[in-house]
């Protein structure tokens, strides 16, 4: 991917945190044996492209209110959806229709129980995939050649600029994800992609990047372009640089994946 202006792309990574000043109303602490009202959101069920998410409450649900806020601060959607006393722990699906296609910066969700109490959480579904010029390696090597250093220097500048610009969102980390095409054996490709991702992550750390860094290699398991086996596809030979508030979701399949420290 060639260097270009940073584009914020929302991925399916959602961080749920309490909404300041919106927990438990109309009274500070509900009376009775039920305990504190809790509202939870399943990160795997946050569908930003489909404009829907799934909410659960630990009490019978009267309604859910939702506000979607764009990066500019514009309110993209604000709705109230009734659930008529749905039982505790019911999956409450809430959908919205945004006013525009602007990227989502924050979603505020309030759950109201049948006793008149409410609690809120905020979802910050934020991450950035940093466009960059791909580092090329010698065949079957993970060594970074001197000729490739200017590419990494340009990427480091872009990563630092983006992390600084969005630092108010929280603890941003960099995730380096290596990929290959389907040429060669799957196990070999997995190991090679992992070593190359580690080499790049280590270079960023050694050259002054102080935010948390993690890497993983996915071999041929997450291609951009679906191909048959033993097909050379340049678009699938890549390393992604992802800035995110929490670890991006890992693919499932025959291999076991985990974000690792360089």
Image (cartoon, rainbow, N blue to C red):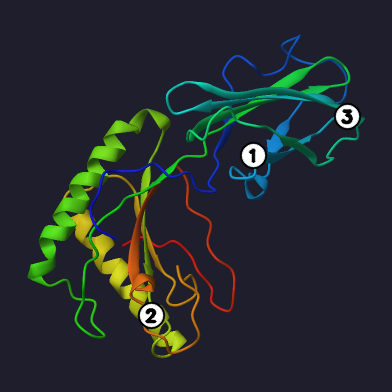
Which residue is tagged 2? 191
How far apart are the alpha carbons under marks 1 and 3? 24 Å
- Whole-percent x, y for residue 192 in the image: 34, 79
Compare marks 2 and 3 and give the one earlier in the sequence: 3
Side (left or right) of 18 relative to 207 = right
Label of residue 60 in the image:
3
Q: Residues within 10 Å of mark 3 (few under 14, many from 20)?
A: many
Location of the N terminus by quadrant is: bottom left
- Whole-percent x, y for residue 92 in the image: 79, 37
Which residue is tagged 1? 51
Compare marks 1 and 3 and give the one earlier in the sequence: 1
Please identify the quarter of the rendering in which residue 215 is found: bottom left
Q: Residues within 10 Å of mark 1 (few under 14, many from 20)?
A: some
Seen at 29% across and 39% down, the residue is 162
Residue 36 visible somewhere in the drawing: no
Seen at 49% across and 28% down, the residue is 70
Compare marks 2 and 1 and give the one earlier in the sequence: 1
How far apart are the alpha carbons under marks 2 and 1? 37 Å
């Amino acid at each position: 991917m060639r260097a270009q202006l940073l584009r914020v792309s929302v991925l399916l990574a959602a961080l749920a945190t309490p909404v300041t000043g919106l927990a438990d109303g109309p009274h500070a602490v509900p009376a009775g044996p039920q305990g504190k009202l809790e509202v939870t959101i399943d990160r795997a069920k946050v569908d930003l492209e489909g404009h829907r998410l799934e909410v659960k409450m630990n009490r019978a649900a009267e309604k859910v209110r939702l506000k979607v806020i764009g990066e500019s601060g514009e309110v993209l959607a604000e709705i109230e959806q009734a659930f008529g006393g749905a039982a505790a722990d019911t999956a409450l699906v809430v959908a919205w229709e945004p006013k525009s296609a602007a990227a989502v910066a924050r979603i505020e969700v309030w759950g109201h129980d049948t006793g008149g109490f409410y609690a809120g959480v905020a979802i910050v579904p934020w991450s950035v995939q940093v466009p960059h010029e791909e580092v090329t390696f010698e065949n079957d090597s993970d060594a970074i050649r001197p000729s490739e250093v200017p590419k990494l220097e340009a990427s480091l500048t872009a990563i630092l600029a983006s992390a600084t610009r969005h630092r108010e969102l929280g603890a941003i980390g960099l995730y380096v994800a290596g990929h290959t095409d389907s040429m060669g054996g799957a196990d070999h490709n997995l190991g090679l992609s992992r070593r190359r991702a580690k080499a790049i992550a280590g270079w960023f750390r050694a050259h002054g990047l102080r935010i948390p860094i993690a890497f993983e290699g996915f071999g041929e398991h997450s291609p951009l372009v679906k191909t048959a086996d033993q097909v050379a596809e340049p678009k699938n030979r890549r390393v992604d640089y992802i800035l995110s508030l929490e670890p991006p979701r890992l693919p499932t399949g025959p291999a076991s994946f985990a974000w690792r420290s360089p």
